[in-house]
Amino acid sequence: MLALNNAHARELSWREPERLRTLIERAFLASRIGNIEAFLLAFDQDADYDSPNFLWFKSRYRRFVYVDRIAVAPEARGRGHARTLYDDLFARAARAGHDRVVCEINSEPPNPASDAFHAALSFVEIGTAVIHGGAKTVRYFARELAA
C-alpha cells in the first residue's frame, strides 16, 4: 500500500511507513484488491485522526465515513476496482448506521479523473478549503446513503 500511495503522493499526500500503518490500524475500513492493485482507506467520525479535511467534516456532521485515500495502480485501471472498493464501503457504512460517505478532491492541483469518478457515484460538492498553508485547494463532497 505504501508504494502505491506514494506513487500518487501528488493527489494523496506522501506517507512514511509508520504513519500509514497507524492510519490503517485506526481506519473504519482499510481494503485492497489483489496484490495491492487498488486500495481504499476510510475513517468514521470517531477516528483519532488529525487531517484538516477529516476535521472539516467532523465539525459539520455527527456521523459520517470519510474516504481519506483511494488509489489504483496504473496497470490495473479500467477494471472497476475503484467502484468495487466504493460499493463495499457504501454497504459497510450503511450497515454500521452511517448516513453519508464524504471525501475531498483537489482543485489545486486538479484531479479531473477523480472529479468524473465521484460525480458518477452521485457525490455532491458541499464546500471548499485552502489547506497546508495554501499548497492545496480542495473541494468537499458527500454522498447520502440509502436508509
Image (cartoon, rainbow, N blue to C red):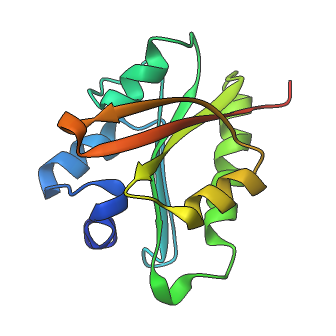
Which residue is located at x 26 percent, y 26 percent? Answer: 50
3 to the left or right of 12:
left
Q: Nearer the viewer, residue 1 or 130?
A: 130
Q: Which quadrant holds the N terminus?
A: bottom left
User: Could you tell me how many numbered marks the image carries?
Assistant: 0
- Which residue appears farthest toward the right when viewing the image? 147
120 to the left or right of 15:
right
Whole-percent x, y for residue 131 in the image: 28, 34
Quarter of the image where one finds residue 116 = bottom right
Quick check: 120 above or below 4?
Answer: above
Which residue is located at x 20 percent, y 55 percent? Answer: 15
Q: Which quadrant holds the C terminus?
A: top right
Q: Nearer the viewer, residue 132 or 73?
A: 132
Whole-percent x, y for residue 96 in the image: 66, 26
Whole-percent x, y for residue 107 in the image: 45, 49
Which residue is located at x 31 percent, y 28 percent? Answer: 52
Whole-percent x, y for residue 99 in the image: 72, 23
25 to the left or right of 126:
left
Quarter of the image where one finds residue 63 = top right
